[in-house]
Image (cartoon, rainbow, N blue to C red):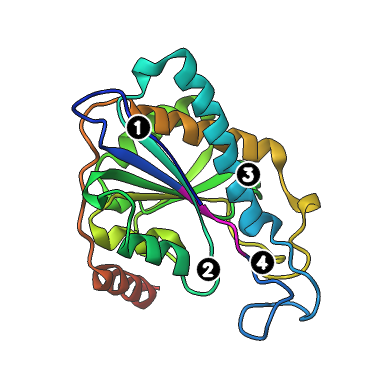
């Protein structure tokens, strides 16, 4: 599923920010993908109906903003919803292999996967090491948002960002953390923090506005997988 809005600046009209979330889950569960009883529906309220809801809300808000202030949108924005993430990033990998726009024109890839369980105001942003631009942009918008942020550098993540980071695209992923209902039938709507989800959508939407508004595109930093593995082993050894 894909929706696209072109930018207004002739120099940047073919540049896009790609926002995504996966809409599949694990059904009734199997031995390989459920951590709870099999045979009961796994609704996946946090994983990943929360990401889908966030993306729809961001799209609605940005559409209204673009109507009133079109000059702010010099770059285009693509909203995409993947299937097959739980089976191995199938949907996003297929698009990355055969995209509808040239991936060299995608200046940033933003992903929302499990963003419905904000607890103690703690929000994790992953993939920060994929661009030197992220930290400044995050700090600027978090002054108003006021989250207690954890910034994780590693761009190799168990979600759809991994289909795009190797293609030379800076990535950033929003995540409110795992929990005991993960891949279990108990991942239902009554466990979600809707106020927190709304705050996350506003925070992310403001960052998208910054990216769409022009300026230099985020640079791409190449990170080797073994660099992070070596650091992890070193840290364990020190402990």
Residue count near mark 2 (Cα–Cα under 10 Å), binned few <14, some 14–19, many ≥20: some
Residue placed at 32% from the left, 62% from the top? 98
Left or right for 151, reference 136:
right
Decide which of tag 2 and tag 3 comes sooner along the chain: 3
Q: CA distance from mark 1 to mark 4?
A: 37 Å
Circles 2 and 4: CB distance less than 8 Å?
Answer: no
Decide which of tag 1 and tag 4 comes sooner along the chain: 1
Which residue is farthest bottom? Answer: 31
Q: CA distance from mark 2 to mark 4?
A: 17 Å
Q: Nearer the viewer, mark 1 or mark 2?
A: 1
| Disc number placed over residue 6 in the picture, else none | 1
Above or below: residue 54 compared with residue 209 = below
Decide which of tag 3 and tag 1 comes sooner along the chain: 1
Q: CA distance from mark 3 to mark 1?
A: 22 Å
**Secondary structure beneath disc 1?**
loop
- Predominant secondary structure, magenta span: strand
| Disc number placed over residue 230 in the picture, else none | none
**Secondary structure beneath disc 2?**
loop
Q: Which residue is mark 4?
A: 182
Q: Which residue is mark 3?
A: 53
Residue placed at 29% from the left, 52% from the top? 129
Given residues 77 and 166, the one toward you in this image is 77
Q: Quadrant of the C terminus?
A: bottom left
Q: Which residue is mark 2?
A: 84
**Secondary structure beneath disc 4?**
loop
Residue count near mark 4 (Cα–Cα under 10 Å), binned few <14, some 14–19, many ≥20: some
Q: Nearer the viewer, mark 2 or mark 3?
A: 2
Image spot of residue 236 (x, y percent): 38, 75
């Amino acid at each position: 599923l894909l929706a696209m809005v072109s930018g207004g600046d002739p120099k940047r009209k073919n540049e896009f920010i790609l926002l995504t979330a996966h809409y599949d889950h694990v059904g009734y569960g199997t031995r390989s993908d459920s951590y709870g009883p099999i045979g009961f529906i796994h609704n996946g309220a946090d994983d990943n109906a929360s990401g889908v809801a966030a993306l729809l809300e961001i799209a609605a808000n940005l559409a209204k903003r673009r109507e009133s202030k079109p000059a702010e949108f010099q770059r285009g924005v693509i909203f995409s919803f993947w299937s097959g993430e739980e089976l191995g990033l199938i949907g996003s990998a297929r698009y990355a292999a055969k995209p509808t726009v040239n991936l060299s024109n995608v200046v940033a890839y933003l992903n929302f996967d499990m963003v419905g369980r904000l607890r103690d105001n703690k929000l994790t942003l992953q993939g920060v090491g994929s661009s030197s631009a992220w930290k400044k942009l995050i700090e600027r918008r978090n002054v108003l948002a006021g989250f207690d942020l954890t910034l994780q550098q590693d761009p190799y993540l168990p979600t759809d960002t991994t289909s795009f980071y190797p293609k030379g695209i800076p990535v950033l992923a929003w995540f409110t953390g795992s929990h005991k209902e993960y891949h279990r039938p108990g991942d239902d709507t009554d466990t979600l923090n809707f106020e927190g989800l709304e705050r996350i959508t506003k925070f992310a939407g403001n960052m998208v506005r910054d990216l769409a508004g022009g300026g230099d595109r985020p640079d791409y930093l190449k990170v080797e997988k073994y660099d992070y593995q070596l650091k992890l082993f070193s840290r364990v050894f020190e402990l």
